[in-house]
Amino acid sequence: MEIIFYLIIFVILCSFAYAGISGAPWVPSKKFDVARFLKLADIKQGQKVYDLGCGDGRLLFPAAELGAVAEGFEISIIPLFLAKFRKLFSGKKINVKIRFKSFWSADLRDADVVFIFLLPKAFPKLREKLESELRPGARVLVHVWPIDGWNPAKIDRKENYCPLYLYVR
């Protein structure tokens, strides 16, 4: 029985490590930043919103409450379970899908809004993916670091908070 416990711990730690290597470790967005993201995104009823590395879903649920069809991708097990738990016990019928899947293999062609809170080391490859998949007019919101080679349509800067970048493809 002890070996099973250690195996479970090992798998969880590996999922955290893989997430950190492939995009970013889980760092939950602050409530204030979630509100800023949503305002900047200007989500309309029925729009498709993706969160790449959605963590515990803290951007997905408020986006869905604004009328979005929200979908998040997460490969780190603990945040994934927190997001699934949040959905299960939200008490609301909201349009949120949380998938145990790498966003690198996700098809983003129908996206209206894409949320990104990743390390800049992932940006060159991600930029190629977004440029090849996103349709004109899709909005990309990035937390903290700008995407090299793209010009932001708007930058939200608040004192003592990280900047948010809005790009329109």
Image (cartoon, grey):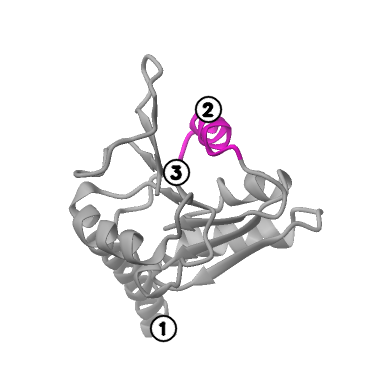
Taking depth in this image into account, of 149 and 59 the one nearest to the observer is 149
Badge 1: how crowded within 10 Å, few (<14), some, or many (20+)? few
Question: According to the image, label 1 marks what residue?
Answer: 4
> Residue 17 is drawn in which quadrant?
bottom left
Please name the amino acid that badge 3 sits on: Pro
Please name the amino acid that badge 2 sits on: Phe
Question: According to the image, label 3 marks what residue?
Answer: 28
Give the side of residue 43 with respect to residue 118, left or right.
Answer: right
The extreme front residue here reads: 136
Q: How far apart are marks 2 and 3 (CA)?
A: 12 Å
Question: According to the image, label 2 marks what residue?
Answer: 32
| Residue drawn at point x = 71 percent, y = 43 percent | 66
Element type where label 3 sits in the image: loop
Element type where label 2 sits in the image: helix
Badge 2: how crowded within 10 Å, few (<14), some, or many (20+)? few
Q: Distance between the residues labelled 1 and 3?
A: 29 Å
The secondary structure making up most of the magenta span is: helix
Q: Measured from the top left, where is residue 51 in percent x and y? A: 48, 55
What range is drawn magenta here?
A: 28-42
Labels 1 & 2 near each other (Cβ < 8 A) = no
| Residue drawn at point x = 64 percent, y = 54 percent | 47
Q: In this view, does 135 lie above or below 26?
A: below
Please name the amino acid that badge 1 sits on: Ile
Q: Is residue 168 above or below residue 4?
A: above
Mark 1 or 2, nearer chain start = 1
All told, the count of numbered labels is 3
Labels 1 & 3 near each other (Cβ < 8 A) = no
Give the side of residue 66 with respect to residue 167, left or right.
Answer: right
Give the side of residue 42 with respect to residue 46, left or right.
Answer: left
